[in-house]
Image (tube, grey):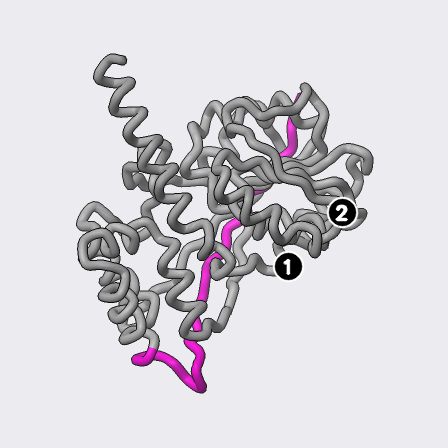
Amino acid sequence: MNVLQSVGATRQSQSSSIFRQVAGHYRYRPRYPRALIAHVSGLSSSLDHSLPAVDVGAGTGLFTFALAQFLVPQRQVVGVEPSADMRANAVAVSPASGSNVTFVDGSSTHLPFADRSLALVTAACAYHRFSRQKFLNECARVLCPQGLLAIVDYQLVSPPGSAGDEIFCLLEKFAPVFVRGHRTNEHGQYESIDISREVLSCRSFSSGHAAHWCNELEFSENEFIGYVSTLSPTLIGMRRLGRPAVESLLRSIFHSHESSGRVAMSFDTLGVFCVNGA
């Protein structure tokens, strides 16, 4: 193994370790706006109902389950997720979420589907971790003609003095490389990624547009700590200070902003949509 291969293997191992640590807390991640799912449903409703929808980088299935439940007409939904721990958490709750959802092992750069076999491909809060151009090429391959690609992401809104602002200040202390508004790329490095520009400029797709939804959510203390615990800089802080110390800091933030036992936070949710031109 040469030096570059060794570095790549180390980063892949670190990424796998992160997903193992946070898999159990992903149930605390923000739910996606129902209006977003309705928008995806409207854009894909005329496509062949026998063709499945695929959610890539499905994690524990938050977006996958929403698609399975709320797409009209209902279609088979497959969650593609390389982390065995994430898939195990998803499968554990999938029986209660309907019979039209399954999870498979797979990579964003080698989607385990035949050419032109899918009506819809989605990636929710996962695109930034992919080899992005290779993923877009794979989407163009597996989507049927006029099939829909939907890339979803969200950002915690953090005006000065808000709970979101205090969370980010803490993350900056845990991980000095962390930059607000930046995402970790396929190499685990923070990068400013213009998702709309990248996706809408891809020549394989057409009829593209982007839209935003404001998602107002409330968190209990356990939900608040659970959500922030899924963020990579928090894990760095836990390795340095220990989980009890970090959770104590998070409780302090929670109690500074809670009202009736809950903290309200806003998430700016982005959807980027385009049609396969094949």
Asked whether, in this view, residue 17 is left or right of residue 197, the answer is left
| x then y, percent, for residue 65 | 64, 51
User: Is residue 235 in sight in this rendering?
Assistant: yes
Sort mark 1 into few (<14), some (14-19) or many (20+) by Cα contacts within 10 Å: few
Q: Is residue 44 left or right of residue 250?
A: right
Among the 4 quarters of the image, the one containing residue 221: bottom left
**Residue 257 lies within the magenta run:** yes
Above or below — where is 46 with respect to 256?
above
Q: What amino acid is found at the position of numbered circle 2 in the picture?
A: Ser
For badge 1, the amino acid type reads Ala
Identify the element where label 2 is drawn.
Answer: loop
Residue lying at 29% horizontally and 67% vertically, measured from the top left = 247
Mark 1 or mark 2: name the one nearer the start of the chain.
1
Q: Mark 1 points at which residue?
A: 35
Check the image and report above or below for 60 versus 7. below
The percent position of residue 9, horizontal first and vertical second, equals 31, 25
Q: In which quarter of the image is the C terminus?
A: top right
